[in-house]
Amino acid sequence: MTHEVVRMNNIKKSFGYVEALRGVDFSVGYSEIVGLIGDNGAGKSTLIKILTGVFPPDSGEIYFEGKKVQFKSPADARRAGIETVYQGFGVAELLSMYRNFFLGRELTKKVGFTTFLDHQWMIDECYKVLSEIGVTVRSPLEPAGVLSGGERQAINIGRAMYFEAKLIVLDEPTTALSVKEVERILQFIEEVHQTGTSVIFITHNIQHVYRVADRFVLLERGIKIGEYLKEEVTPEQIIEALTIGSIQK
């Protein structure tokens, strides 16, 4: 059995004349947190959107749990066990917290031959999960718009944990959060790791990702310029590699 939950080989993607990815290899092991690092325009989000079915690659191969795949939509990726928490906190502000939590995966009950949404079950489950992960709310019936940025990220991560994702993709999860909220999100990631779930942490903030990641993959203008285990590098060396393209020994 493969030790990798995901392997992407020689992934290429262009948008018109712009080469977003130029033959990138990328992998994530079981129960591993991989920091995918690079400045804006490095190709991080494009690589993940190809993995999760938003874009098809121009060429290259993708394997999930050892099987060759090409997800045709984010829904395909989600059904396989990949949950993505997008930058921007990813909630519908006017919907209630519990409807956000179960959006697209609503719990149902049967009455005779008719299937109905089980609102009370969803409310109870949402409240339980939010309480377990430390988000204090008066009621899951309140709109998600009342939550802070950190609380919205917590709902998304809690949702991924609830549905037992095999791989959680976090796209800039600490952007625009307070120091206290960043600390809580990093704690969530550490808790997810302890359950055996794999995580891709996409960021340009070296200090945040260095604390939780096991391995770092560095992208620059669509090219992988480095890959390091945590014990091999310091945060300063990662910054150096992004700046000059390599680590000076």
Image: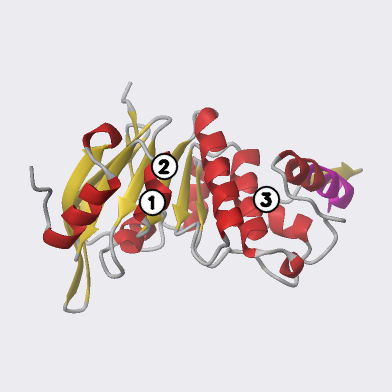
**Residue designated by label 2:** 211
Side of 131 where 175 appears, left or right: left
Query: Residue 32 at x, y = what percent?
Result: 39, 34
- Asked if the residue at tag 2 contacts the one at tag 1, i.e. Cβ–Cβ closer than 8 Å, the answer is yes
In the rendered image, the residue lying farthest to the right is 112
Q: Residue at x 26, y 42 (%)?
A: 234
Query: Residue 177 at x, y = what percent?
Result: 56, 63
Does residue 32 lie above or below 176 as drawn?
A: above
Image: magenta residue range: 113-125
Query: Residue 180 at x, y = what percent?
Result: 60, 54
**Residue designated by label 1:** 207
Numbered badge on residue 89 = none
Mark toward the viewer: 3 or 1: 1
In the rendered image, the residue lying farthest to the top is 1
Q: Residue at x 32, y 51 (%)?
A: 36
Residue 118 among magenta residues: yes
Residue 4 seen in the figure: yes
> Could you tell me the amino acid type at mark 3?
Arg
Q: CA distance from mark 3 to mark 1?
A: 35 Å
Q: CA distance from mark 1 to mark 2?
A: 7 Å
Side of 6 where 97 appears, left or right: right
